[in-house]
Amino acid sequence: MPDVTLPELVRNGTMSEQMAAVLWSVAAERRWFIVAAKPRKAGKSAVSEAVLHFAPPGTPIHRLSGEIEEMERLAHSPDGGYLVVGEISPQRPERYIWGEAVTVLFRTLNAGFALNTTLHASSIEEVFDQICQENGVSDEDAGKIEYIAYVERFGGDPDGAEDDDLYWRRVSGLYEIGAVRDGVPDARLLSRWLETDDRFVQERGPQLLDASENTLEARARQIRELADGGRTGLEDIETLRGASN
């Protein structure tokens, strides 16, 4: 799904405008975030890219190849940008990393970058189990991951063999992560999706963002206005990006 934006994800029902407003603020403040899901073709990368559109103008976005040498070079010239990893996974397509590469990734991040990646997991706890227990990342480093959007996919072929257009998706939970202890996160549910009547519920406001409650409400309104007006292209969000700084 090329060039998907947060207003488009609100328009098609993937997430609420309140979720989108938090994710806009996450990128605007260069916070670390992960998009997780269990099945294939859940739209993890599309959601990630939609969020990254709201990074401050001029923010370097480094889409890593997965090679350790590339990360080590970046560590010598940190620029405050995002390191974008295709996926943390023991599978090894291009841009996926596991094991030693994950260790090097977090060392590079600590030189002066923010993280965006995706991950296959059945729960938020499993996200951190893979990062901490299976890849040996410390609680301190894992605790720098502040936000996780969990996506569920419905329709089509359960094995993911059919065309992407046959699926529909929902961000079933948006979480803010506090401290990580012994690989277990203090995960606070901010918003969730109710399958029974296909609607979103806001549980609580974020505690870690600099954006105020009023700012988040204003951003939610702006995104909803674009979504309702069908103005969901990249050119339509340029005014929003300017307003985030």
Image: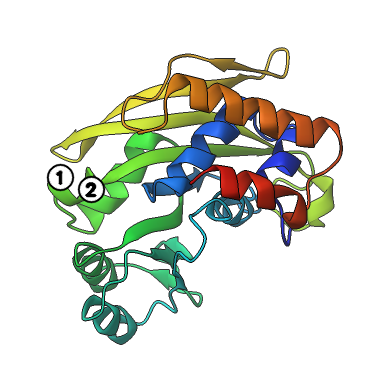
Instruction: Say which quarter of the image contains residue 180.
Output: top left
Q: Categorize mark 1 by other alpha carbons within 10 Å: few (<14), some (14-19), many (20+).
A: some
As drawn, 76 above or below 113: below
Q: Determine whether, in the image, residue 193 is placed left or right of residue 106.
A: right
As drawn, 153 above or below 165: above
Q: Determine whether, in the image, residue 221 is placed left or right of residue 204.
A: right
Name the residue located 27 percent from the left edge and 66 percent from the top edge: 102
User: Residue 139 — which label?
Assistant: 1
Question: Which residue type does callout 1 highlight?
Answer: Asp
For the residues labelled 2 and 1, say whether their Cβ atoms are less than 8 Å apart: yes
Give x and y (percent) for residue 159.
68, 52
Give x and y (percent) for residue 213.
45, 20
User: Residue 203 — which label?
Assistant: none
Q: Categorize mark 2 by other alpha carbons within 10 Å: few (<14), some (14-19), many (20+).
A: many
Q: Which quadrant holds the N terminus?
A: bottom right
Give x and y (percent) for residue 144.
25, 46
Give x and y (percent) for residue 15.
65, 32
Name the residue located 45 percent from the left edge and 62 percent from the top edge: 87
Q: Report the residue marked by disc 2.
A: 142
How much space separates mark 2 and mark 1, taking CA atoms? 5 Å
